[in-house]
Amino acid sequence: MLKGLAITPPVIGRISIGRVIEKNGKRLPQKDDQFTLTTQVQNRDGWLLHPLNESLRKANVGKLRSIPVRLLFNDPDLNLRSEYALFDRDSGRPVCVGNGETCKRASDNAIESLPCPSPDGCAFGRAGNCKPYGRLNVVVGDEDELGSFIFRTTSYNSIRTLAARLHYFGAVSGNLLACLPLELKLRGKSTTQSHRSAIYYVDLAMRSGNTLEEAIHQAREVDSRRKAAGFDQVALDQAARAGFGRGAFEESVEDSSAVAEEFFSNADRSDSDAAAGFSGSPAPSRDITSVPPATARLRQKLDRRVASLRIDAA
């Protein structure tokens, strides 16, 4: 197997709550207040819709604001990977990725391991528009039991809510996340940053019609059937954990340009998944051992910006 290649969950589609539109010659995120399921294929009009998008809409009254899902893994951190990320706006490749304690940063010749004080405490991050970035993989439908849809977001609300739900549901179910009947739900709220207008974020809940106790009972039954059939969930989690750990960055060269366009191409926007709830394709990423000229230029700009911030502070 290739070294430095992150092995990510197989992806058969995307979940988004927005799209990219062209306005005045620029490609900008467009808000939406419902889910959309797409394939991984684009044309001039955008991402092609997945067949499940239509079937789910027929099963719902009104807008598609809930999707029945299940998870691939029992480990919450395998289902949702979140980090602070700074992308090169020219090439779309990740420049710096951290967890608030340590980070991996692309230098001139290699990947450096450095302290990560989070975006608010990092001059390099502030100058380059570093922000939280999360990816959630879920299974929708029964066609492919190991094929997932990916939801990508830069919203504090979605990342924080999804992380809490995953850890809580894992705890109360006895670590049976992959067996619980769940659904993604779109919720709205207003904040001072949104100027009192509604913003939307993604939550995870028990599937409609199930209480928590009923869902846990179903999960135990599913777990028993799987074990009887020889399904090894522990080994699946271990394989996924090892796959994620093989690469410096999860995003591939093919994915990174779309990610940068959808999330990092403009100045900070309000904390809304409606402006940042896009998904990308599943291709694995490679370990970067050299930095392209565009990344080098970005580092030079960031270094100059950091130097000016220090002078102003003095």
Image (spheres, helix red, strand yellow):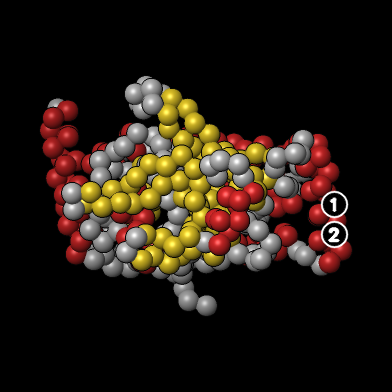
Location of mark 2 (residue): 225
* Alpha carbon separation for disc pair 2 and 1: 6 Å
Measuring from the top left, give residue 274's x and y in whole percent.
Answer: 41, 41
Circle number at residue 303: none
- Please tell me which residue lies in front, 91 or 262: 262
- Is 192 displayed left or right of 309 in the figure? right
Location of mark 1 (residue): 221
- Is 255 displayed left or right of 218 in the figure? left
Measuring from the top left, give residue 35's x and y in whole percent.
Answer: 51, 47
Q: Secondary structure at mark 2?
A: helix
- Dot 2, how many residues are within 10 Å of its Cα: few (below 14), some (14-19), or many (20+)? few
Q: Secondary structure at mark 1?
A: helix
Kindly identify the residue that appears in the image at 31 percent across and 37 percent down.
269
Q: Quadrant of residue 279?
A: bottom left
Tell whether label 1 touches label 2 (CB within 8 Å): yes
Kindly identify the residue that appears in the image at 33 percent across and 47 percent down.
29
Residue lying furthest bottom: 1
| Quadrant occupied by the C terminus | top left
Measuring from the top left, give residue 158's x and y in whole percent.
Answer: 50, 39
Q: Quadrant of residue 10?
A: bottom right
Q: Identify which amino acid the numbered label 1 is placed on.
A: Glu
- Please tell me which residue lies in front, 185 or 115: 185
Kindly identify the residue that appears in the image at 51 percent across and 55 percent down.
37
- Dot 1, how many residues are within 10 Å of its Cα: few (below 14), some (14-19), or many (20+)? few
Can residue 10 be seen here? yes
Q: Quadrant of residue 206?
A: top right
Q: Vertically, is 131 above or below 88?
A: above
- Is 14 displayed left or right of 47 in the figure? right
Measuring from the top left, give residue 304's x and y in whole percent.
Answer: 14, 45
Can residue 133 be seen here? no
Q: Identify which amino acid the numbered label 2 is placed on.
A: Arg
